Image: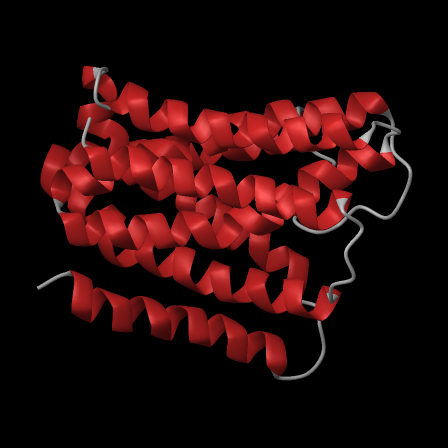
Amino acid sequence: MTRPALLYGLAAAAANIVGALAVTARATWSVRILDALLSFAAGFLISVSLVDLFPDAIAQVGAIAPSVVLLAYLLVHITQHTIGRHFHFGEETHSVSELVSMSALVGLLMHTFVDGVAVASGLRVSTGLGALVFVAVLLHKFPEGVAISSLFLAAGAGRRRALLSAAALGAMTILGVLVTSQWAFLRTYGLAISAGVTLYVGASNLVPEFQDRPGLRIPASFVGGCALYFAARAVAIT
């Protein structure tokens, strides 16, 4: 494991907690800003998945890579629609049961683990790709922390448990970083798995959160996320 991988993992985990603090501190903040952040993050995530992670996975493991990408996508889809089916990226404003909040947490743990795998796998290819993947992960960590902590509060949990739920997601990301360097399977297939999960988070988790919003602000944010990705890529990958 490299030091940058661990630092990236810690920073991503901190973003989960910052998102939870934004909710538990009862700070006044705009839902419109969150929507714009979600669309911006979606554009960046989908871009890094399709343009970098997918091709690099094929270069690394060959023709089996697309099948691994699809399998990872399907596994997250099944998990989200069985264990964590009530989860959405946004502040929960309706009362929910404790079972719903816990199932959402369990459902998210798998994909936050892969966040760490993605960062570590990207760094194994190059520092530039690792940095791009880190930015992609970081962009959705704040709304993820907002969502899980607000779910716990809506289920009647106290602020401490709400913060701990976000901290658990962050810890799982760090674990993903640590395990990738030790497990040969992840060193081999980590990029392909990351491509599938990253694509799912961007296209199937984030896009539905904002696609029905009126006006040009949200599409512009989405395109902005794609544009930032290509601008950052031009600098990071030479």
Q: Quadrant of residue 119?
A: top left
Indicate the position of residue 154 as horizontal and vertical percent values.
86, 37
Indicate the position of residue 179 as horizontal and vertical percent values.
30, 19
Which quadrant holds the N terminus?
top left
Count of labels shown?
Answer: 0
Indicate the position of residue 129 as horizontal and vertical percent values.
21, 51
Residue located 40% across and 61% down the image: 44
Q: Is residue 75 left or right of residue 63?
A: right
Q: Quadrant of residue 193?
A: top left
Residue located 28% across and 55% down the image: 132
Q: Residue furthest bottom?
A: 216
Which quadrant holds the C terminus?
bottom left
Q: Is residue 234 above or below residue 126?
A: below
Residue located 70% across and 51% down the image: 90
Indicate the position of residue 26 as horizontal and vertical percent values.
80, 50
Q: Foreground residue, 49 or 162? A: 162
Q: Is residue 183 left or right of residue 209?
A: left
